[in-house]
Amino acid sequence: MHRYSRRQFLKVALAATSMQPLYALATQLGKMAVATDEPYKALVVILLEGGADVFNMIAPTQTDTYADYQATRENIALPRTSLLPFSHANQNGLNPAAYGMRENMTALHNLFMDQKLAIIANCGTLLQPVTRYDVENGAPIPFELFAHNTQRSQWMLGDATGSQHQGWGARLGNTLYSSGNPWFNINAADSNNLLQTGGATDAIHFDEPSVSSDTMTSYGFGPESGGSELGKVYQSLYKQQLESPNKLMRALARKRIDELLRPNQLAGLFDNALSFDGFSDGVHETGKPLGRQLELVANILSVRQEFQNRFQTNRQIFFVNQHGWDTHDSDNAHQVGYLSESMGAFQNALAEMGMEEQVTTLTISDFGRSLTSNNAGTDHGWGGHAFVLGGAVRGGDIYGKMPALRPDSPDAWSDRMIPTTSVETYLATIAKWFGLSDTELDMVFPNLGAFSQRDLGFMS
């Protein structure tokens, strides 16, 4: 572990929108409401973009159930002897010893055995609990069920009813920080995301572990500055735009002002940031490698005390994105191995900082995949498993109901698993640990009441 120099940390692209007037913005940014007096906590959300084939990540190991799995998956079934077994018996009504992980998931397998990783079985978008019989007889199901963009949006909105237009991360921020906090949602991915969109303040985007220099102070631009002649021109232009009757002009002015003032807020913030070993670029990643995104999150977490001291922020959500999971024409072996390696490296970084109990990492995806092979890979599905990692996780167990992986499975419809755990129940369990009351959970996840279970019990 070593420190970045100040020079190394003097460049970043930050993007956010604020609704505060020009002359009050800098002061307001530093005086946001405090969510709670409890210790710092963070969520790290990993999107497995494209729809992860989790049924080749967790597979049955018992003789009869493996035979069903092999008959169903045919040419893409994994050899039984290659699976990494779960050696302990049932704790949560299921039997982890009846399953194993893919052989290149060593890091996640070790974390499961160390009881730091939990598996959430057959989770997905739902309007209400449904069975195969219900679906086949016209029960309501999410719209555009197998479409990437729609299903990914429903996961990130935390709602399949279509009633929500803010991401669940944005709604969490609004709940915990009533006046908004621009440092709550941080996007470390190489793309925008709905999960953190629509709140009182937008997510900040960090592209790399560095911060742009404060170019505008030298021009005399600042909340109390008369400054140079050029600075006065900037002040006048933005003041006119903020008072413009044109809403678009006002919004653009506010956004630009926010971008210009952010470096002042961040000056010196990363002077003592740490770097970590173990993160890699992968082999042939699409977009920014997952390992580098998680490394960036670890860099930022290493200066969390600065966020707490300067901005009264002791809750944060980080978003990262792993591309390449739409495996119609291939197995997902590479994505699986790289996910495991990257999550393992991130957990090691948290351990170095003594933050394992304070940070919970969770996966989401567009949907699961089809049970059967299309002779090359798998097609779009519905339900799938999720992973939750951290020191506050009651790991080493499987939560929910594992579906039957066999031909004509009673848990499937049109070759797709019907979820038995809703997105809302999954996320609400984590949000409760994050500090939300039962009343606040219903506000953030309005359709939570459609499901009998509100807490799956995998968080301590």
Image: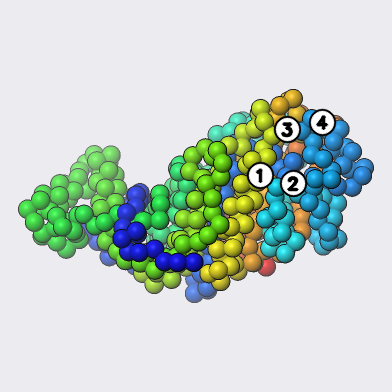
Q: Nearer the viewer, residue 288 or 444?
A: 288
Q: Position of residue 138 (x, y in %)?
A: 74, 30
* Nearer-N-terminus badge (2/3): 2
Q: Position of residue 194 (x, y in %)?
A: 49, 44
Say if mark 1 contacts mark 2, CB within 8 Å.
yes
The residues tagged by marks 4 and 2 sit, at their Cα atoms, a distance apart of 16 Å
Q: Amino acid at mark 2?
A: Arg
Asked which secondary structure carries label 1, the reply is helix
The residues tagged by marks 2 and 3 sit, at their Cα atoms, a distance apart of 18 Å
Residue where numbered disc 3 is placed: 370
Q: Amino acid at mark 4?
A: Glu
* Nearer-N-terminus badge (4/3): 4
Residue where numbered disc 2 is placed: 102
Residue where numbered disc 4 is placed: 74
The residues tagged by marks 1 and 2 sit, at their Cα atoms, a distance apart of 8 Å
* Nearer-N-terminus badge (1/4): 4
Horizontal arrangement in the rendering, residue 313 relative to residue 415 (left or right): left
* Nearer-N-terminus badge (3/1): 1
The residues tagged by marks 4 and 3 sit, at their Cα atoms, a distance apart of 12 Å
Label 2 or label 3, whichever lies nearer to me, is: 2
Residue where numbered disc 1 is placed: 336
Label 3 or label 1, whichever lies nearer to me, is: 1
